[in-house]
Image (cartoon, grey):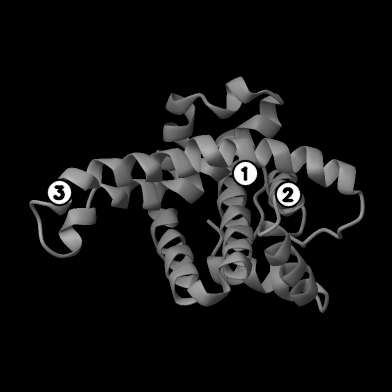
């Protein structure tokens, strides 16, 4: 299994990475243009799925980024935001009954599953080139189950990074998702290779 530290070093070691992250974070705030930012996230998962060295792609080829971003955003809304919203709704009855942070317990599963589930959905979409493949919940659950031991710390790191960097939310969200999605996709690919008995990336 890869480590989050190694993924981050490879992903952000390029001198242009800071500028790319700033642009990505700013685009996340702009309606329609945010599809370009999600296009970069889509491309990162695609790179990892092919076993390529993780690298933030350039902002050239905006049509390709936009098309991939639309796909990634749709999957993010269904597999990422929907579980969080469901937990938020379920927490409302507890707010009048429970005092303190325990009232937000229904939010925890959605927060923990949003990023890895979205990455798994995008990964499967790229394999099958269809939304049907992206939303096969049984297969997605199997992917997360197979890698569950390696997802706990990176997912908590993502949540912590976004929370600490809340004042710079769009930028921290973009950076956090870029690192997390690359890590998850690399894990999925290594799992596939191990099942096939093929070579694995270090």
Q: Residue 94, which numbered label?
A: 3
Residue 49: which quarter of the image? top right
**Residue contact between numbered discs 1 and 2, judged by CB atoms under 8 Å:** yes
Q: Secondary structure at mark 3?
A: helix
What residue appears at the point 38 percent right and 52 percent down from the top-left corner?
112
Mark-to-mark CA distance, 1 and 2: 7 Å
Mark-to-mark CA distance, 3 and 2: 45 Å
Sequence order check, earlier mark of 1 and 2? 2
Q: Nearer the viewer, mark 3 or mark 1?
A: 3
**Residue contact between numbered discs 3 and 1, judged by CB atoms under 8 Å:** no
What residue appears at the point 81 percent right and 46 percent down from the top-left corner?
65
Q: Residue 189, which numbered label?
A: 1
What residue appears at the point 53 percent right and 56 percent down from the top-left corner?
1
For disc 2, the marked residue is 51
What percent of the width, then of the height, locates residue 119?
57, 44
Compared across the picture, whether 135 is left or right of 51 comes to left
What percent of the width, then of the height, locates residue 108?
30, 52
């Amino acid at each position: 299994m890869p480590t989050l530290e190694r993924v981050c070093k490879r992903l952000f070691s390029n001198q242009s990475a800071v500028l790319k992250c700033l642009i990505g974070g700013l685009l996340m705030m702009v309606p329609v243009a945010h599809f370009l930012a999600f296009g970069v996230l889509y491309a990162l998962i695609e790179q990892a799925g092919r076993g390529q060295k993780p690298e933030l792609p350039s902002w050239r080829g905006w049509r390709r980024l936009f098309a991939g971003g639309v796909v990634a955003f749709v999957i993010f809304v269904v597999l990422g935001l929907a579980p969080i919203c469901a937990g938020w709704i379920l927490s409302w009855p507890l707010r009048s009954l429970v005092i303190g942070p325990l009232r937000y317990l229904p939010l925890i599963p959605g927060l923990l599953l949003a990023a890895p589930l979205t990455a798994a959905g995008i990964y499967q979409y790229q394999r099958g080139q269809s939304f049907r493949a992206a939303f096969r919940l049984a297969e997605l659950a199997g992917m997360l189950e197979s890698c569950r031991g390696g997802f706990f710390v990176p997912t908590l790191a993502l949540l912590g990074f976004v929370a600490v960097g809340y004042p710079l939310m769009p930028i921290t969200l973009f950076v956090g998702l870029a690192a997390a999605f690359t890590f998850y996709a690399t894990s999925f690919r290594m799992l596939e290779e191990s099942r096939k008995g093929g070579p694995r990336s270090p």
